[in-house]
Each structure stands twice: as structure tokens, then as C-alpha cells.
Image: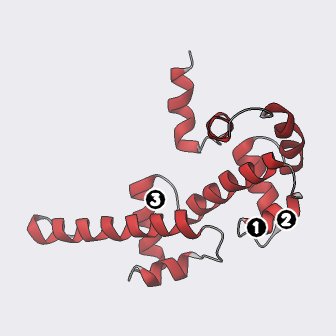
């Protein structure tokens, strides 16, 4: 990308495309999304989208998608009326193993343990408060959050 007005215009166009990709992930997280399809719709190559998305948001499109899915899964598991497998498929994951691994990485406990423990912890709590209290901390937020607690 060059400097000057043309380079700046291209950068702004790319940022607008990245915002649309992020908004689509937020909206359609339960759909079978993949980086190739997202890139095609944004008129970018998959590699370019991944690099630009990571530069703008600090994580890959796939990682962002999985975080959205895990956040939604946490809410569904807190309700307690769906099995872990049902929740996995409800949020758009096709592999229970991948879902459980990513859930454990983000939340710190496996989904089955979270489901069992969260039902008791958030009982009687308004859902908006429960969502905030139990929200997963993504990697780039962990260091910033840690410094504020001390």
C-alpha cells in the first residue's frame, strides 16, 4: 500500500470491509462461516483478510468467530436446558472436540463443568449481569484486565 491520498483511501476501504466482516461474524456466528467465504464476500484473498483482520482487531477472523460462538455457548449452557452437544451445534460448531477444546481455552473449564457450575452461580441473577460476570476474557484483554484488578 502506498502513501498519499490513494494509499489512505485504500486503507479506509479495507477497514470498512473488515468492519463488515466482523459485523457479519457477530450476526451469523451460528452459520457455517469460513475464512474463504468471508474473504470472497469482502473481495479479498483469505490470506489478506486474515492479515488485515489480525492487524485491526488483534486476532484472526477464525479466533474472533470462535470467541463469539463460545460467548453464546456460555449463555446457552447457563440456561441448563440443553446438553453440551446441543449447544455445540446450536452455536455453529460442527466438531464437539474443537468446541470443547476452544471453550476450555477461553473459559478455563470444560463446557460440561461450566454448565454444571454456572447453573448454580448465576441463579437469580439478571441475565445482563450474568453475561457480564461470566464473559470470557480474550488473550489481548487479559493483560489489561489484570492490571485494573490490583
Please give the residue where the numbered disc 1 appears in the rendered image: 90
Q: Is residue 86 left or right of residue 2?
A: right
Image quadrant in which the C terminus is located: top right
Earlier sequence position, callout 2 versus callout 3: 3
Please give the residue where the numbered disc 3 appears in the rendered image: 54
Q: Residue at x 61, y 37 (%)?
A: 132
Separation (CA) of disc 2 from disc 1 = 6 Å
Check the image and name the residue furthest to the left: 5
Check the image and name the residue furthest to the top: 150
Please give the residue where the numbered disc 2 appears in the rendered image: 86
Q: Can you give x and y, in whole percent of width and height, for residue 145 in the image?
A: 54, 30
Earlier sequence position, callout 3 versus callout 1: 3
- Proximity of marks 2 and 1: CB atoms separated by less than 8 Å: yes
For label 3, the crowd category at 10 Å Cα-Cα, with few meaning under 14, some 14 to 19 and many 20 or more, is some
Q: Can you give x and y, in whole percent of width and height, for residue 100 in the image?
A: 81, 56
Q: Can you give x and y, in whole percent of width and height, for residue 30 in the image?
A: 66, 69
Amino acid at each position: 500500500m502506498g502513501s498519499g491520498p490513494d494509499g489512505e483511501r485504500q486503507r479506509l476501504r479495507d477497514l470498512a470491509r473488515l468492519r463488515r466482516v466482523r459485523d457479519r461474524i457477530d450476526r451469523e456466528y451460528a452459520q457455517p462461516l469460513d475464512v474463504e467465504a468471508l474473504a470472497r464476500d469482502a473481495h479479498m484473498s483469505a490470506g489478506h483478510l486474515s492479515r488485515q483482520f489480525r492487524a485491526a482487531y488483534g486476532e484472526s477472523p477464525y479466533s474472533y468467530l470462535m470467541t463469539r460462538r463460545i460467548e453464546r455457548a456460555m449463555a446457552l449452557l447457563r440456561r441448563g436446558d440443553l446438553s453440551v452437544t446441543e449447544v455445540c451445534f446450536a452455536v455453529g460448531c460442527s466438531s464437539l472436540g474443537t468446541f470443547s477444546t476452544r471453550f476450555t481455552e477461553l473459559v478455563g473449564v470444560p463446557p460440561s463443568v461450566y454448565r454444571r457450575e454456572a447453573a448454580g452461580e448465576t441463579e437469580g441473577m439478571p441475565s445482563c449481569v450474568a453475561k457480564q460476570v461470566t464473559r470470557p476474557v480474550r488473550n489481548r484483554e487479559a493483560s489489561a484486565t489484570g492490571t485494573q484488578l490490583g
